[in-house]
Image: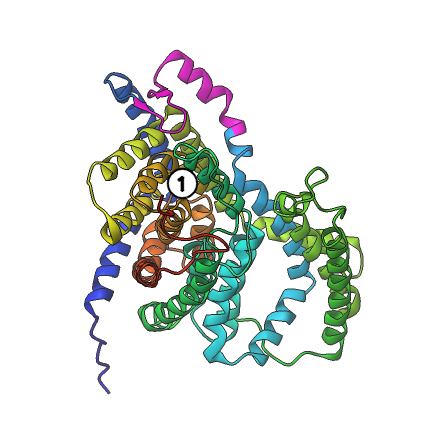
Amino acid sequence: MIEVEKKKSGVDKFLSVVERIGNALPHPATLFAGFALLVIILSWIASQFDMAVVHPGTGETVTPVNLLSRDGLHRILTQMVTNFTGFAPLGTVLVSLLGIGIAEGTGLIGAVLRLVVLSSPKRLLTFVIVFAGVISNTASEVGYVLLVPLAAVIFLAAGRHPLAGLAAAFAGVSGGYSANLLLGTVDPLLAGLSTEAAKIIDPNYAVNPAANYYFMFVSTFIISALGTWITEKVVIPRLGEYEGDEKPQSIDRLSPQEKRGILYATIAVLLMVAFILGGLIPEGGYLRDPKTGEILHSPFMSGIVAFIFLLAGIAGVAYGIGAKTIRNDSDVMRGMAKSMETLGSYIVLVFFAAQFVAYFNWTNLGLILAINGAGVLKTLGLSGIPLMITFIMVAATINMIMGSASAKWAIMAPVFIPMFMLLGYTPEFTQTAYRIGDSVTNIISPMMSYFALIVAFIQRYDKKAGIGTVISTMLPYTVAFFIGWTILFIIWILLDLPLGPGAEMYMPKP
């Protein structure tokens, strides 16, 4: 029987070209090393020309810093180690995976995955993963270090391509960054910056942290639906059958010992949850901010990574005792050590990525590019829906060179919030448009803090994968999220709906 090759669609051909071009690039670590060297050279070039800009928030003049100088050389040499050890995602990943390593080593994760696969309808599996990714943003980095690799394992256990599960989770966690059913740490952060920018026009104006809540609540379901559709209709057909070396975990029904282990783990988790709630629910709870009593800026939110470690570690040990997979403390330590073995390539990648990000910040090149980009939009003279769509596109583009949402908004808010207020739009409205643009390109931006980690996760299932694989796989999500979110925003504008409690779209008429 002659096998007929399936004809590729235009989209599939385009994504294949993107993947080939991206994967033709050097190893990601080599690429970041090259970027770091390029930044050093560009810093010298920029310093030879008048490339100074005025920071819209502080009024200070921002000039390029030359790293190709004696002072620059000294800084590169003396801060090489701290650039690496101080790289934010590194500690988060290492500490979280130590706890997860215990849970994996004792067999807890495998047992829970089998239980999920056996009890969940396949039709809902993708939606649940994307939805869980969006919700995970409430707990900061949990989605990146826990849900993304977990989704790949779940898909593999269900007989589906693991990279499809990984992509679905990554799309929810990073592409749906601003959507949520609950307020997260980013809400008060952005609201504070918006308030300061609004005071340029109205000294008494205040933006509350829940200013975008209604819109983001609805966005959660829109993003989950779009992510599910792209996964099923674009990503899975393009990936085809999985032919890698990773084997799916057994999905046999749980043994009596495993059930007892899950019972013990459940009891341990419930006790931990009771401890957490006991520290959060009372007004003077021991996990709240001791000065203000807030939760969003509390030791709990700041120490969320520690709680991941403790929850996973304690649950893993409890399961091991119940299922009798732990004989002594050496078994626990062995599980932690094994989780570190998988991070070799990631640590190499992080070393060079950390140097590049540090150099980029030192030279002020990112700041200068972002301010100039914002200035271009200001001079276009657009208004209404076209203005907001253009603004979303600018925010999405700037997101490709600056990964921090707060850093970008600190630059853009003092320019656009006052300008849009004078045009009749509230700061809450402008902030909503910014959050859409800031989210949709996260999944294709190498400047995103956890991009290197995603590359490492993908290489577990595809040894030849690289930056091009990530970008080509995630690009359909970016396009779908941008179109879907923008349409939702336009509908919101046309219906003149409130964006959050007390947050209208238009400034009150005098």
Magenta segment boundaries in residue numbering: 53-82
- Residue 466 appearing in the image: no
- Residue 370 appearing in the image: yes
Which residue is at a point 44% across and 30% down the rendered structure image?
A: 358
- Picture layout, residue 266 above or below residue 351: below
- Residue type pointed to by label 1: Ala
Which residue is at a point 46% across and 71% down the rendered structure image?
A: 127
User: Looking at this view, is 392 or 354 the one in front?
Assistant: 392
Image coords of residue 379 (percent x, y): 21, 36
Residue lying at the far front of the rendered structure: 510
Q: Quadrant of the C terminus?
A: top left
Image coords of residue 282 (percent x, y): 76, 52
Which residue is at a point 56% across and 76% down the rendered structure image?
A: 117
Residue 495 shown left or right of residue 189 in the figure: left
Image coords of residue 334 (percent x, y): 69, 53
Which residue is at a point 60% across and 48% down the rendered structure image?
A: 340
Q: Quadrant of the N terminus?
A: bottom left
User: Looking at this view, is 278 or 27 the one in front?
Assistant: 278
Image coords of residue 197 (percent x, y): 42, 35
- Picture layout, residue 169 above or below residue 366: below
When asked about the image quadrant of residue 494, the answer is bottom left
Display coloring = rainbow
The verdict on residue 66 being magenta is yes
Would you name the residue on which mark 1 appears?
29
The number of numbered discs placed on residues in the rendered structure image is: 1
Label 1 element class = helix
Residue 289 shown left or right of residue 453 in the figure: right
- Picture layout, residue 168 above or below residue 393: below
Residue lying at the far top of the rendered structure: 70
Residue 128 shown left or right of residue 49 in the figure: right
